Image (tube, rainbow, N blue to C red):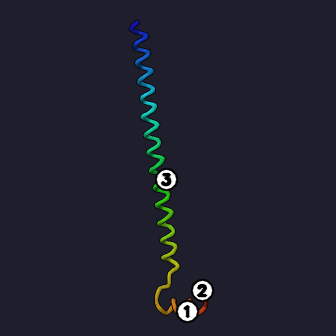
Amino acid sequence: MAAIALAALTIILFLLNLRRVGERTGRAAERINILERTNEIQRRMLDAAARRPRDRNELVDRLRDGGF
C-alpha cells in the first residue's frame, strides 16, 4: 500500500512540476516577443534618424528636389 501511495505522490509531483515548467516557458517566450518588438522599433527609429536631413540647407535641397 505504501508503494502505491509513493508512486501516486511521485506522479502528482511530476505533473505539478510540468505545469510550473510550462508557465516558465510561456513567460520566457513572452519576454522574447517583447524584446523582438522593442528591437524592431529601435531599428526603425535608427533608420529614420539616419535618413533625416543634417542641416537646414540639406532640408531645403530635399524639398526643392522633391526627395522627401
Mark found first going from the N terminus, 3 or 2: 3
Give the x, y percent position of residue 43: 50, 67
Per the model, the C-alpha gap separating discs 3 and 2 is: 35 Å
In the displayed structure, 18 sits above or below 27; it is: above
Q: Amino acid at mark 3?
A: Asn
Residue at image location 46% in from the left, 61% down from the top: 38
| Camera-side residue of 9 and 51 | 9
Q: How many marks?
A: 3
Residue at image location 50% in from the left, 81% down from the top: 52
The quarter in which the C terminus is drawn is bottom right
In the displayed structure, 46 sits above or below 30; it is: below
Give the x, y percent position of residue 29: 48, 47
Q: Within 10 Å of the Cα at label 1, are there few (<14), some (14-19), or many (20+) other Cα atoms? A: few
Mark 3 = which residue? 33
Residue at image location 46% in from the left, 55% down from the top: 34
Numbered badge on residue 61: 1
